[in-house]
Amino acid sequence: MRLKESIAGLCIMIAGLSGCTSNVSPASYSVGSVGQVNRTVAAKVISVRPVDIAGTTGTGGTVGGALGATAGSGIGHGDRANVAGAIAGAVVGAVAGAALEQGATRQAGFEYVVQTENDNLMTIVQGANPTFTINDKVLVLYGSPARLIPDPRKQ
């Protein structure tokens, strides 16, 4: 019976991890950002490179390990077999949970190198939308996170 419960728990974990993906869009702000003033600098995009954004938190490995230990402890007869099964199940579950989390939280994004009007270079990684191309005029919004937005004063 423990094995069925553990498999059900693993399925719930997989479904739940799809909601763990971090929002890396420059169009999304946290509640704490409301009313904050950020420094903004005009710049021009001089380089664009696609990147993968990994958002692992360790939750997948932890939950996978716990579920694996629970499932593994039901293997065999006797205390020694149960302990050995729990240890093996925890290791396998942690590895599988971490791999599932990594796959579920991976996102596409872009690394932008921009040159400001006073010739400073900055590199910013953000989500795939909006997408900028070389020579696009943008505004760099300082903050946490920093972000690029289209310059509404484009000429």
Image: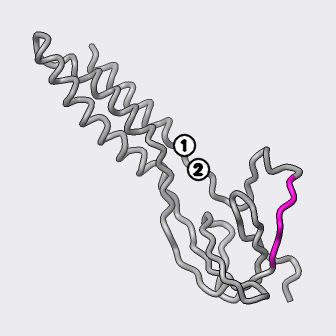
Q: Residue at x 57, y 71 (%)?
A: 110
State the residue position of label 2.
Answer: 22
- Does residue 46 sit above or below 96 in this rendering? below
State the residue position of label 1.
Answer: 20
Q: Is residue 35 left or right of residue 73?
A: right
- Amino acid type at circle 1 is Cys
- Does residue 51 sit above or below 49 in this rendering? above
Helix, strand or loop under label 1: helix
Q: Indicate yes or no whether the magenta region holds residue 94.
A: no
Q: Is residue 81 left or right of residue 99?
A: left
Q: Are marks 2 and 1 in contact (CB under 8 Å)?
A: yes
Q: Residue at x 27, y 25 (%)?
A: 69
Segment colored magenta: 36-41
Q: Which picture quadrant has residue 12?
A: top left
Residue 126 x %, y %: 62, 65
Residue 45 x %, y %: 68, 84
